[in-house]
Image: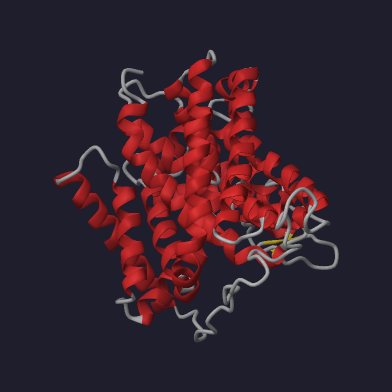
Amino acid sequence: MHLESQNIDRSKDDKGMNIMGISMPVYLILTLSITLAVWLDVTPHNMLTGFVFALSWGGLLSWLGTRSKKFDLAGGPSLLCLFVPTTLLFFGIIPDHFDRLARLFLTGVIGYIDFFIAALISGSILSMNRNILVKAGTRYAVPLAGGVILALSLTGFLGSISSYGLRESLREVAIPVMAGGIGAGAIPIAQMYTMHDPGETAWLSILLPAAVLANLLSILFAALLSVLGQKRDRFFKNFSGQGALMQEGSTEFDLKEDPGSKIGQFTDMGLGLILAGALFTFGSLISRLFFPMIHAYAWTILAAIILKLMNILPSRLEKGAKEWYGLISVIGVPTILVVTSLAVIEMHVIVQVFADPVYVMLVTFCTIVAMLSAGFIGLLVKMNFVEAAITAGLCMANMGGSGDIATLGAARRMNLMPFAQISSRLGGALMLFIASVMAPWLVFAI
């Protein structure tokens, strides 16, 4: 999906010293005050304390991640939010009760993760342009789905004949790579695995390296395709459309967004919150009563897609979902990354995973398969190889959001952003559904 590394208020003054719209000294005073209270453990462990602590840290770390343009495009804000807090905890620089607060806030009684994922699912799907979805969906789904199927199956096969194993390569490499990110990919998938794992394995720490490495590889491969794609028929006919997704003579999709009406009312956000909660409640109900082995997130996704395609929701509700989604994408992403860093990530597991050369090889192989299969399958539905490989392949394997920007920027094809968004949103939703269905088998007998 597409929220990774969306930064909190990227607007800057001339010196770039504003954080979330206020001067850095003022922001630091607020953050230090909140941190000191949490450090002394004199605050109640509730929604307010957990949220303001995580948001203040998330805002600061996201801002630091934007100081370098290259680091920013490579997912710098998300990477700092994910790895700085857990590193401080690992080395004992901050006390253990930071971890307890984060756990209670994220997955404990407060359960912020469900609050976040519900907004993510409903908003990302319902805020899409239905015309683009209907017109482009059928044809574009062919290389996208083909890339996913081949990436999963071939990576699983390679894992089965190597020392890694079939289930392990699917569970820890192919699925997190193709899920397209962290906040909307690795985190909910880790939740799904945990539901079926009584041993409470450190799933997120295992999944994170795949998402991070695949994002970097996607950017590098996009730059390579950009160079190779300077000649239209370099290796074969329709190798590159030089920025055009469809082959010459084919009807290009109309990608103009609906102008829509101006939104921003507080009541719209309230409606969006209600709708997100209703969809998640429905998903939980179906999961609990009829299909307990399939996570509630999967049914929430399916319900949102059906509502969008049927076009039966009042426009006010869809606008509300978009507004609520917009708010959560700004303040929710860094917030959940910070608490996830403190509560879930284990640094020693990440170091161990990255040190495995077979693991690194499988992640690289999965990313290449996604790219090549999407490109070649795209040729069958009259798309150009390079553009299909980038949008339906690499934009599935990157971290969404800033990953899409960096990938298309490296390929010099920013005009393809609507298709990258389809990959990040619907492709990411598809991967969550697949992960939910496969999770019982993937984590069986761990």
Q: Position of residue 255 (x, y in %)?
A: 58, 75
Residue in the image at 46% along x and 57% along y: 426
Q: How is the image coloured?
A: secondary structure
63 lies above or below 18: above
Give the camera-side residue of 80 and 194.
Answer: 194
Is residue 155 placed above or below 76 in the rendered structure?
above
Residue 250, position as x, y percentages in the image: 61, 71
Q: Quadrant of residue 118?
A: bottom left
In this orientation, which residue lies closer to the viewer: 444 or 328?
444
Outermost residue to the front:
237
Is residue 113 something one can see in this rendering? yes
Q: Residue furthest top?
A: 163
- Residue 202 place in picture, x, y as percent: 46, 26
User: Taking the image as drawn, is residue 164 in sight?
Assistant: no
Farthest-out residue, right: 15
Direction from residue 395 to residue 121 in the image, left or right: left
Where the C terminus falls, by quadrant? top left
* Closer to us: 433 or 71: 433
Task: Say if 85 sits above or below 112 in the image.
Answer: above
Q: Nearer the viewer, residue 360 or 189?
A: 360
Tell me how many marks there are: 0
Residue drawn at (60%, 38%), measured in percent from left and top? 369
Question: Which residue occupies 48% across, 57% down?
Answer: 141
Who's the residue at 44% across and 33% down the image? Answer: 100
Residue 365 image position (x, y, % from top left): 62, 31
